[in-house]
Amino acid sequence: MRRVLALAFVAAVSLAALPDAAQAQSRPGGGQTADGSSIETRQRARTLPLGRRANAGPCPIVRILYDAARYVELQDNRAIAANVGYTGEIEGVTSDCRYRDDDPIVVDTNMLFALGKGPNAQGDGRTYRYWVAVTSRDQAILAKEYFDLPVQFDGQDRTRVSESQTIVIPRASAQTSGANFEILIGFDVTPEMAEFNRVGSRFCVDASGTSAGTCINR
């Protein structure tokens, strides 16, 4: 199998109000029709475009890299609430793909970012940076691209942003399956931020005011 040599990314950002993550990820309940097929399957079949055909194979797996799933600015790298600047978390990602014959694999993704301002944040806006990478299923990185995510908090201390990306993966032949590829997403973090994420650290507030308020939760 020839490795991917090029990728095309198309970005679209929406700062509109979003439902809660749990609501956004909810799906209709079960149930069956008289012929035994599920109601959800029957409804989905009615709403698919008439020209939509089955893909030639499975879609690439799309996931958030754990070490880069959160962005937490900490003054002097001390995990106490007073030191927290801007924060972010990639709360979830949904994806779909399409490819037939020997066409490239076109993957549509939508990412939900939860972003915040801590006591040490300076200003009312922050441009976050994140990346999207295509790998050969837990092996070599075939391509990686960085994107800026400008955010205005408008006087609030938190907001949510939906970011969409379309990723085009060339294929060597009609036999090259989407199962050969994996798409990873993460914030552009420092080594200290990555370690903070890797060990599952959390900053905490000392309500009593008698200690530094540092905590490590795993």
Image: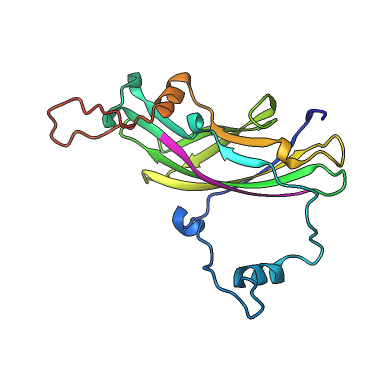
The C terminus - image quarter: top left
Along the line of sight, which residue is nearer the eye, 210 or 151? Answer: 210
Q: Is residue 139 positioned above or below 176 on the image? A: above
The answer to whether 149 appears left or right of 95 in the picture is left
Residue drawn where x is 63% and y is 29% of the image: 138
The N terminus - image quarter: top right
Is residue 39 part of the magenta span, yes or no? Answer: no
Q: Give coordinates of residue 48: x percent, y percent.
A: 72, 65
| Residue farthest along the bottom direction in this orientation | 34
Residue drawn where x is 61% and y is 70% of the image: 38
The answer to whether 218 appears left or right of 93 in the picture is left
Residue drawn where x is 79% and y is 61% of the image: 52
Q: Is residue 164 positioned above or below 131 on the image? A: below
Range of the magenta residues?
A: 87-98
Q: Give coordinates of residue 14: x percent, y percent.
A: 57, 50
Residue 46 visible somewhere in the drawing: yes
The structure's colour scheme is rainbow
Residue drawn where x is 66% and y is 30% of the image: 145
Along the line of sight, which residue is nearer the eye, 65 or 108? Answer: 65
Q: Give coordinates of residue 66: x percent, y percent.
A: 49, 33
Give the dominant element type of the magenta stretch: helix, strand or loop: strand
